């Protein structure tokens, strides 16, 4: 139905992530997209304010909000399947593109030019920060599961960290060093004094 874009976006909360894993703390793609947007914004701010790069953190955050929107139609394909071989990955990327185009077509015509680029991000600098934020979000999920006593995520945690360190951006290294340690703390250990 035409003009159903936002109603479909609201259904992101029904699509769970980590489908092959036993989760202590279930996560849906709406929650995940929010965290990726928060981290992507931080990475862009780090790039701009720490390393002197030229980037718009608000545009990065907004694009990150929609980075998994195509999964409304495709679902969250587990990574072991998605990356099993290049043909599967290529085919899945094509399916994601069709799904993103379909979502954009469900917007009122005057809104499509504003949202099309967000769902079909083409800027390499923005894309690389969103991908890094996506990996950092997965790493945080693994840390939280481990903290909850769920060893199911032990190997995933090591693999995700390896993928982050295999292609390190200065921004991700900065985030790992300055921000990640707080995710291992309990609420009482976090500084909540005002």
Image: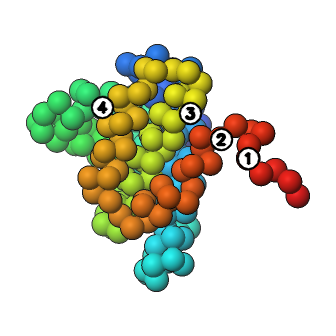
Lower sequence index among marks 1 and 2:
2
Q: State the separation of the CA atoms marked 3 and 2.
A: 10 Å
Identify the element where label 3 is drawn: helix
Answer with left or right where residue 19 lies relative to residue 13.
left
- Mark 4 lies on residue: 79
- Asked whether disc 1 touches disc 2, contact meaning CB atoms under 8 Å apart, the reply is yes
Identify the element where label 4 is drawn: helix
Q: State the separation of the CA atoms marked 1 and 2.
A: 6 Å
Viewer-nearest of discs 3 and 2? 2
Q: Quadrant of residue 116?
A: bottom left
- Asked whether disc 3 touches disc 4, contact meaning CB atoms under 8 Å apart, the reply is no
Lower sequence index among marks 3 and 4:
4
- Mark 1 lies on residue: 190
Q: Position of residue 124 (x, y in %)?
A: 30, 66
Q: Position of residue 96 (x, y in %)?
A: 30, 41
Q: Position of residue 87 (x, y in %)?
A: 11, 36
């Amino acid at each position: 139905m035409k003009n159903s874009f936002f109603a479909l976006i609201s259904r992101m909360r029904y699509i769970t992530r980590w489908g092959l894993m036993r989760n202590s703390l279930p996560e849906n793609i709406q929650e995940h997209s929010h965290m990726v947007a928060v981290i992507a914004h931080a990475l862009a701010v780090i790039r701009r304010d720490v390393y002197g790069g030229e980037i718009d953190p608000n545009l990065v955050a907004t694009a990150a909000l929609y980075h998994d929107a195509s999964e409304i139609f495709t679902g969250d394909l587990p990574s072991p399947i998605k990356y099993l071989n290049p043909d599967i990955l290529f085919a899945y990327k094509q399916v994601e593109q069709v799904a993103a185009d379909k979502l954009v077509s469900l917007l009122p015509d005057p809104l499509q030019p504003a949202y099309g680029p967000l769902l079909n991000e083409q800027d390499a600098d923005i894309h690389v920060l969103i991908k890094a934020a996506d990996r950092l979000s997965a790493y945080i999920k693994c840390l939280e599961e481990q903290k909850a006593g769920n060893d199911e995520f032990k190997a995933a945690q090591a693999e995700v960290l390896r993928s982050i360190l295999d292609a390190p951006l200065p921004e991700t290294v900065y985030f790992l060093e300055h921000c990640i340690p707080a995710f291992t703390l309990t609420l009482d250990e976090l500084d909540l004094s005002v």
